[in-house]
Amino acid sequence: MNPHAPIIQMKNIEKHFGSVIALAGVSLEVFPGECHCLLGDNGAGKSTFIKTMSGVHKPTKGEILFEGKPLHFDRPRDAINAGIATVYQDLAMIPLMSVSRNFFMGNEPLRKVGPLKFFDHEHANSVTMEEMRRMGINLRGPDQAVGTLSGGERQTVAIARAVHFGAKVLILDEPTSALGVRQTANVLSTIDKVRKQGIAVVFITHNVRHAMAVADRFTVLNRGKTLGTAQRGQITPEELQDLMAGGQELVELEGSLGGTV
Amino acid sequence: MSHAHTQLPDDERIKSRSRLREALIRPELGGIVGTIVVFALFAVFAFDSGMFKSQGIMNWSQVSAQFMIIAVGACLLMIAGEFDLSVGSMIGFSGMMIAMFSVTLGWPVWLAILVTFVLALAIGALNGFIVVRTGLPSFIVTLASLFILRGFTIYFPQTIERKTIIGGVSEVAQGDWLAAVFGGKILTGLFTWLGNAGLIATFDRGLRKGQPVVDGVPMLIVWALVLVVIGHIVLTRTRFGNWIFASGGDAQAARYAGVPVNRVKISMFMFTAFCATVFATCQVMEFGSAGADRGLLKEFEAIIAVVIGGALLTGGYGSVIGAALGALIFGVVQQGLFFAGVESSLFRVFLGVILLCAVILNTYVRRLITGER
């Protein structure tokens, strides 16, 4: 599965907010074409970690190597330009705007008319329709508002957008946490398609079943630290669940709930 | 990832829509319907009053053009997710600055106008900077500017000239090239020809006997039309327009996508200040004076026009054409009631009813388009 060198390496990342240590030395490497699942309970530091990866936060300590070279991001734009795209759970799309305007938000295609530059709606519309068809989304038209799409479709549009604009690393922040069963399945199959194109996917979730469905490797975060990385097939869902929750307590809780968690 | 399944079966849950319905379902629908209703009403009740003769048309066109100029600025700013309550005070302030620079300080009028524009843009930028830096609602920040600017507009002429109206601008503006850009008229030849041909009313006695009553299109109207066209093109046909929608729709999502939200918002505050100053300059050139109470309540009139035009108060959605129609409705109703001989206090009643109906219709249309619940 990992014939190449890692595309991105996070080495001993620490992030302090004032006196709060959000990340206390997290390391992670992701290879092209793998889906690396980052698991952790609420407050484990998942969000802080991916924000560091996507240029929103600067690490207090530690090193980021992208394609083997050290990288420093000052703004999210730097990370996007380098090929690291992030799809946030509920901030992926703007519901009031059309699918095509959303798709090209921040990357508007331009058409020159004399000295003036205009938004090339024709190009934007045809590309959007084509990309949506590939992802299996039926649009009434490219000017249909994103607000009329379901949550799963919005995530899919955001993923298609990131891939279209040349993402090499795609970070998905809990893309399935607010979705129904069918929509979750759609998003997971989209992740699978993206991975097969050779893009490295970092999939953040706290749902072990979703993780098991697509991930090649799993890294568990707890209280700002890495609890280790496991290959697919080397770990059971139960073990992952225990690691996320920090072990013993959940076992007791689970016992009292009849093993349903 | 192949092109194999480009033909997807139609989703049975998406109802097909007729062409007519597609054409009607647009943000400007409220403004279009309102305009038709208003013109129809006045055509029935005030047709013989002179409202649709050259002088009458010029009368309501000029009032509507004033509203349009400030509505374009307010519209783009509102779509970008912010308000400017200091528009009215900015009109008073800019007008007063032009009069004081040119009359009191004796600067050439073109210099007075240019310096005033620079000053206004700087104040707009400051409004925007404070809003994006502090994260406070623009409602509060520009409410402060409303008082501060109005205060200075009264203070400067009071302390320096001991009066609140500065006159004599017409005299110093004679022959000034930039003053003519705001106070002049175009197409005067066409109107003289129309008058001679008997197509429009002419004076039948006095010094100007034989000349048309309406002798040209004031630059005020030209400015309004130019600003509407530019505003519409920028919003719908440029990259910056997409950024305006994105900044107002969801600033954080836009930032994550690489849109320079702060820059967009600050430049929209500057544009609003620019529009207010265009309004003020045209007004000062027309009246030949500046008064400390000019522009009072204009911010609300601009916002009303924008909302009639289909914009969403919380940002991210709207139309410059709609705002222009809102301004037209506003101007036609205000002047039309006068022509129809209706008690002028009923203007507010009429306006309130139109505002309410337009907003209800707009909300319905917007839900159809955006899928809001």
Image (tube, grey):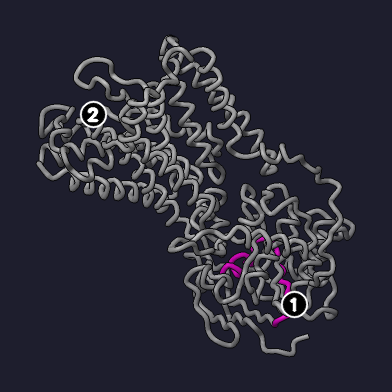
Judge whether B246 appears above or below B113 on screen.
below
Secondary structure under tag 1 reads: loop
- Residue B254 picture quarter: bottom right
Label 2 amino acid?
A: Phe
Which residue is more in the foreground, B289 or A32? B289
- The residue under label 1 is which amino acid type? Gln
Horizontal arrangement in the rendering, residue B284 relative to residue A43 (left or right): left
Q: Residue B341 lies in what quarter of the image?
A: top left
Q: Give the range drawn in magenta.
A: A32-52
The secondary element bearing badge 2 is classed as: helix
Please tell me how many numbered marks the rendered image carries: 2
Question: Alpha-carbon distance for marks 1 and 2?
Answer: 69 Å
Residue B287, numbered label:
2
Residue A130 pos. (x, y %)? 73, 64
Viewer-side label of 1, 2:
2
Depicted A234 relative to depicted B326: above or below:
below
**Chain of the residue that carries numbered disc 1 in the rendered image:** A
Q: Name the residue that disc number 1 marks.
A: A197
Residue occupying image coordinates x 19% and y 20%: B207
x and y, in percent, of residue B42 in the image:
51, 17
Residue at x 74% of width, y 57% of height: A177
